[in-house]
Image: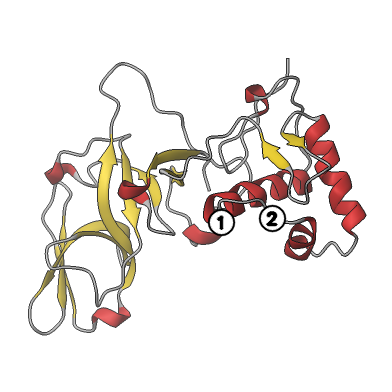
Amino acid sequence: MARSEPTSTGLSPATAPQAESLTDIERKILDFMVQYLRANTYQPSIREIGRRFGIKSTKTVSEHLHVLAEKGYLERDSSRSRGVRILGVDLSTETVSVPCFSEMPDDPATAAEASGLERMSIDRRLGGTEGSFFLRASGADLALLGVEEGDLVLVSPVTATLVEDGAVVLARTGAGTVFHRLRRNGRGVVLESLGSESERVGVDDPEQLELLGRVAGFYRRMDESVLPAPTRH
């Protein structure tokens, strides 16, 4: 039986017949094809794939696609220039694939590209903003909002100048990466703790605030099933 090794797009060998594990470059090419298709509604050309990965030979790219097809990830139609169909992954334009982190990485954008990272597909209206991610709540991070440890908190990118008064945000402060409620006070902003102990941090210049995003919602299983543990960073 094939070993399940999810790609960053959520595709697993177990979802395609007789699928085999991928090399690093095969995984990256497949992820790129899925992301490109979701963004453009059509597949990248062989030359576009080559440019993305610095592969000058179209024959080499074609060989990678041939191997992906042999491993059960693609179906190819040689009579069409972009005649490739990706197997075993939901490409609905109504959903978006969002990375999930157990711990906050230094750079969410870079970490989101990691191979094998757990991802969830959600309605685009809930998490359609590019750069959104799920962060697993720990301890009493958002206790005042009823968020429990293990819930997945959806964070969407926002700038300090655009975030609305009263929004729940994720920011880096002297205490680390922490959730706060942001309040404007006429001079700057105040970050109010949402943990079990009430704390306030004043920031005179909001532009100096390292704001990672605003909380758009959270996800919790209401049955006894346990959410899969995303890859740690």
Tag 2: amino acid: Pro
For residue 165, what is the image quadrant? Answer: bottom left
Judge by depth and name the residue closer to the eye, 26 or 210: 26
Judge by depth and name the residue closer to the eye, 156 or 174: 156
* Residue drawn at 86 percent across, 48 percent down: 62
Q: Give the vertical position of 148 relative to 171 (above or below).
A: above
Q: Which circle marks residue 92 in the picture?
A: none
* Residue drawn at 78 percent across, 37 percent down: 68
Instruction: Residue under label 2, please give it.
Output: 44
Q: Give the vertical position of 191 relative to 11 (above or below).
A: below
Secondary element at tag 1: helix
Asked if residue 70 shows in the view, the reply is: yes
Tell me: 2 left or right of 222: right
Question: Where does residue 122 sit, x and y in percent of width and height?
Answer: 38, 40
Q: Give the vertical position of 94 relative to 57 (above or below).
A: above
* Residue drawn at 40 percent across, 28 percent down: 227
Tag 1: amino acid: Asn
Check if mark 2's residue and mark 1's residue have beta carbons within 8 Å: yes
Q: Quadrant of the N terminus?
A: top right
Q: Which circle marks residue 40 in the picture?
A: 1
Question: Where does residue 230 sit, x and y in percent of width and height?
Answer: 48, 37
Mark 1 nearby-residue class (10 Å; few <14, some 14–19, many ≥20): few
